[in-house]
Image: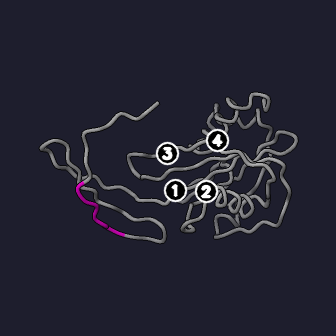
Amino acid sequence: MNAPSHPFSVEDDQLVHAWHVFRLLRRRLRTGSQSFERTFLDSPGAVGTLAIDDDNHVILVHQYRATIDDMLWEIPAGMRDVEGEESLVTAQRELEEEAGLIAANWERLGSLTAAAGVTNSIVEVFIARQLSEVPLQPHGPEEEHMTVARVSFADAVAMVVDGRITDAKSSIAILLAARKHPELL
């Protein structure tokens, strides 16, 4: 489906604040004779990997997220914080760092916008198969306290449905994989 054209034009972006890889931008827009502003978080995007072992178990990480002050079940993921790095390479790096795994087979599932009213971040999600273990490489206090678990694919779907997995990229990756690969169930 092609996106319809829209009557909006960007007049200007102003930097409000910058952090490591994020920028808070104020965007001035126009539609017809009306001018207005929107503020959003500019992000390089992220990747997520649905790693599935030979027994159809999904690798999940349980990690603390300061934004909600709670632990979340998620697929291994990370920011696209290395300029010019292909999203697949970022996914491979993050899977190795967070889950201690490398994969011989990769499939791109798709991309998503998790919070389009707040950020322009696009998250690309992949399936990784034919897994091999390598040493974990945690980065930062959250990853040092993170646990890695293997759950059956059917249980991962159930965790999405019953609300134990609430993370958008993880939920979408699991449900997309269930739709594209019903044999996993």
Q: Is residue 103 left or right of residue 143?
A: right
Is 12 within the magenta? yes
Residue 179 is drawn in which quadrant? Answer: top right
Position of 72 relative to 159 (above/below): below
* Labels 3, 2: front one: 2
x and y percent of residue 87 in the render?
61, 56
Q: Which of the marked residues, 3 or 2, is nearer the chain's N terminus? A: 2
Element assignment for label 3: loop
Q: Main secondary structure of the magenta part?
A: strand
x and y percent of residue 88 in the render?
65, 55
Q: Amino acid at mark 3?
A: Ala
Cα gap from disc 3 to disc 2, whole angstroms: 17 Å
Q: Are marks 3 and 2 in contact (CB under 8 Å)?
A: no
Query: In front here: 8 or 51?
Result: 8
Q: Is residue 184 left or right of residue 89?
A: right
Q: Amino acid at mark 4?
A: Leu
Cα gap from disc 2 to disc 4, whole angstroms: 12 Å
| Residue drawn at the location 79% of the way across and 61% of the way down | 100
